[in-house]
Amino acid sequence: MPLLQVENRILRLIANGVSLEETARQLCLEIEALLPDVVCTLMTVDPAGLLHPLATPSLPDAYALAIDGVMIGPEVGSCGTAAYMRKTVGIADIAADPRWARYKDHALVAGLKACWSYPIISESGDPIGVLALYFREHRGPREAEMGVISTALDLCGMALRRHERVVDRERRANVDVLTGLPNRAAFNAALECMPCDEPGIWALFMIDLDNLKIVNDTFGHLAGDRLIQVAAARIARAVAPDVTFRIGGDEFAVLVQAPALLSDLDAAARRIFRGLELAAPCEGHMVVPQATIGGAVFGPSESTAAAVSEAADFALYHAKETGRGGFVRYWPGIGTRITHRRDAIRDVAAALGDGRIEAHYQPIVGLDTGEIVGLEALCRMRGRDGTLIAAHEFHEATADAHIAAELTEHMAAMIAGDMVRWRDQGLRVGHVGLNVSSADFYTGSISKKLERAFGPVGVPLDQLVVEVSEDVYIGRRDGVVAREIERLRATGVRVALDDFGTGHASLTHVLNVPVDIIKIDRSFVERLWPDDPSIVIVEGLIKIARRLEIMVIAEGIETEVQASQLWSMGCMLGQGFAFARATDRDATAALLRRHAAGIAGVTPLYAGRKGMLREPDAAAPARRRTAAG
Ligand code: C2E
Ligand code: CA
Ligand code: CA
């Protein structure tokens, strides 16, 4: 009974503590003796997912060398694929199978035409080895050979486990103790071994946990550790069988190889976000793990593993700086954007320090009367040379938490001062809008800030509008923005949904987090041509908003025609260059004196020729009646 003898011989080697390499070599030779014309190999898979030949007695040395350090993946010959899929992979025609495309030459030169690979899985479910049988014909194992193979697999498992100490030492060096995930060293090793021949074949996600620091600081390090463990397990599950690494305190990396994930990285990132989104118990506290993801694909411009890694880092950095909780995919201009943003932050910080940030005001007018019913405060930066710089040139800086907090406080104080002055001059201002950014919602309570600025000077909060842009309003899943909006409205402050139509907000969102005002973005207003779908959208929005008792303000009205057209569609309020650009406190006072609604004898406000609104005005109601049937 030769098989039994073989088994005993190998068991004896294992029991006597013969080295793993030697045991594996003997095993392969014995199997080859039992199954003539078969070449047998055994490889290990390290924690990073790299293949290492353990015993390849009948393979040419060059072949064994070529396999060493190859990352397992969905198309990595028979062995790499079997380890990646965690199941047997049989390939009867190495020359023709796409999974062998990158490796076939070595096998074919050695006269090997088919290969059956069997993964050896650890108790924790990770691949630790692969037993492979190569055939010199286009065939798989025969029925009669199955007994030998299954015995061989048992022996391989035993041999690998018996040498757990050796394997363990390797694991300890490469595995993160807290999460059991491969660590930074393993990541570096894996990255070095990624295939660099075919663009688009793999991608890298860098994932940063957003709330670890807060959890550590408020609930203690045990809770923080638990959060890391939960997040690690969930990320790993979301991307399996692709490998997740823990590469830093709160940083993870995923080497993305699965075709389904590669084909749509946004969807892949969403899969991770969805995997994370349930609250998890962390030492008695329920915590929702939150993450930000940057990604980059191996491709023509990022053509080395190091370049991909750097690109993914850039993307993560950009994602963190411009709004945590999202996914940013690397694009070639991202470096310039980051630099530009950094410059903007530096400039605004300096301007705040020197008192060179000013509040300017753009009037909001009644489209029927042309009278000013309110203002929007827009910040301006005074250059050191005295030039005035508009917010769109530096508003990227407001994504920075410190800048946002300081800017909002500064603007609130200036607006409060100006409102008091106008009031003392007997001017009627209506409401004044203040813009806030996403970061404002994460740096203390906006409503408290407003109370502090406006309470002491006696400006009632119902004269204030906080403008929240659409992407901020719906971009976050954590409820922080929604709760703050509720708080603001409870204090009497009105909330405007800014830039409506630029993102993905729909009216359903408006129902979920109620607002008082919707500001239709300029991109709609500038397209109000006959037959443009904008018209239908804006008309529909106006109708629905009216039913929900939400005020609508059209932004960026540049011509009298647009103004009258909007009015005929039922929009009552607007702002834009057709009426006035933003101006400083004193110029605004002069405008209010002449054009503020509710004062006897005021005239309508137009930037251009007086009375320009009159004609379309007269026609408008008629058109509206026609439209209504
Ligand atoms: P926004 O809130 O949508 O503000 C409207 C922008 O459109 C302003 O640019 C305004 O000058 C411009 N605008 C107004 N009417 C017209 C028009 O008829 N045609 C055109 N082409 N543009 C018009 P600005 O002041 O450069 O502000 C840009 C963005 O910066 C603002 O967009 C807002 O998101 C942000 N921002 C402005 N001030 C502040 C602030 O105090 N705090 C924060 N966090 N963000 C601010
Ligand atoms: Ca605004
Ligand atoms: Ca806007």
Image (cartoon, grey):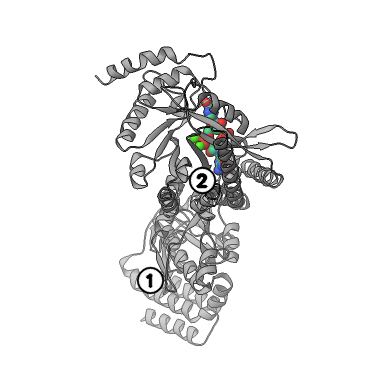
**Towards the viewer: 283 or 225:** 283
Tell me whether circle 2 and circle 1 mark residues in contact (CB < 8 Å).
no
Type of amino acid at the residue the image marks with label 1: Ile
Dot 2 or dot 1: first in sequence order is 1
**Quadrant where the N terminus lies?**
bottom left
Q: State left or right for residue 476 relative to residue 53.
A: left
Dividing the picture into quarters, in which one does residue 617 lie? Answer: top left
**Farthest residue in the left direction?**
629
**Towards the viewer: 151 or 191:** 191
**Towards the viewer: 203 or 542:** 542
Q: Which residue is mark 1?
A: 149
Type of amino acid at the residue the image marks with label 2: Gly
Residue 94 against residue 466 in the figure, above or below: below
Numbered-mark total = 2
Residue 428 against residue 252 in the figure, above or below: above
Judged from the image, the secondary structure of the residue bearing numbered disc 1 is helix
**Farthest residue in the bottom direction?**
16
**Towards the viewer: 55 or 539:** 539
Q: State left or right for residue 90 relative to residue 435.
A: left
Q: Name the spot of residue 421 as percent of width and height, x first.
A: 59, 38
Q: Name the spot of residue 412 as percent of width and height, x first.
A: 56, 45
Q: Which residue is mark 2?
A: 200
Judge whether residue 92 can be spotted in this image: yes
Judged from the image, the secondary structure of the residue bearing numbered disc 2 is loop
**Farthest residue in the top direction?**
615
Label 2 to label 1: alpha-carbon separation: 37 Å
**Quadrant where the C terminus lies?**
top left
Q: Name the spot of residue 381 as percent of width and height, x first.
A: 66, 38
Camera-nearest label, 2 or 1? 2
Q: Residue at x 63, y 45 (%)?
A: 338
Q: Which mark is residue 384?
A: none
Judge whether residue 56 can be spotted in this image: no
